[in-house]
Image (cartoon, helix red, strand yellow):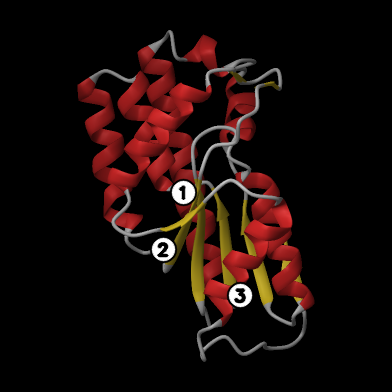
Amino acid sequence: MLLMLIGIGGPTLSGKTTMTLKLCEELAERGFRVGLVPEFAKTVAKEMGISKVEDVRRNPEKYFQFELEVLLKKLTLEERLRERFDFVVSDTTLAEIILYSKLYLPNNFSRIVESIAKKYLKRYDVVFLLEPLNVQSNDGFRSERDVANRRKHYAILKRIYPKFVEIPVASVDERLEWILDELLQNDRTTPSNPVHFDSSP
């Protein structure tokens, strides 16, 4: 049934969630069955009683538990939705989990996370890697003001991914059009009915 497992990747503040939602809506409007895998960081943080990601990063054991839980939730839902939909779109991918584990966990912990994530990283049929936006944000969970730092993270992600399609900074509509052009040029992408867009975990 599955035509493509799509990853929307990039560092913090690259527009991943916005692009994921727009892409799911557009594919559903075109008649495809679409499943959404959300970013799980805030969900897991709430379950663990974490209010700010910076706080949990000060505790290696707890942050290790946090990243493992995000990883397992993402893997589980991606696998479940693959059985039901034409397209499954994942907001953030396993590569971002590897990135932040490398940056914020001791080597013994980060190697465990990386070894699990890398086993499944190649299963994405296509990853759209979004260049970071020149914006600042503090959403209460993450505070990210350093654009140069996010560009470094972007460069690391380009080395982690086995393959990706680079999406530069542009308007949301332009980025969406580039992604759709890449996806729908393939003859396999014929809509199936009924139209369905599932955003539930």
C-alpha separation, residue under disc 2 versus residue under disc 3: 14 Å
Q: Which mark is residue 93?
A: 1
Rendering quarter of residue 156: top left
- Looking at the image, can residue 200 be seen? no
Residue 183 position within the rendered picture, expressed as x and y whole percent measured from the top left: 54, 74
Residue 84 position within the rendered picture, expressed as x and y whole percent measured from the top left: 60, 75
- Looking at the image, can residue 120 be seen? yes
- Tell me the residue that label 2 is attached to: 124
Q: Nearer the viewer, mark 1 or mark 3?
A: 1
- Tell me the residue that label 3 is attached to: 85
C-alpha separation, residue under disc 2 versus residue under disc 1: 9 Å
181 displayed left or right of 93: right
Residue type marked 1: Thr
186 displayed left or right of 42: left
Which structural element holds mark 1?
A: loop
Q: Is residue 30 above or below residue 109?
A: below
Residue 87 position within the rendered picture, expressed as x and y whole percent measured from the top left: 58, 72
150 displayed left or right of 121: right
| Front in this rendered view, residue 171 or 31 | 171
Residue type marked 3: Phe
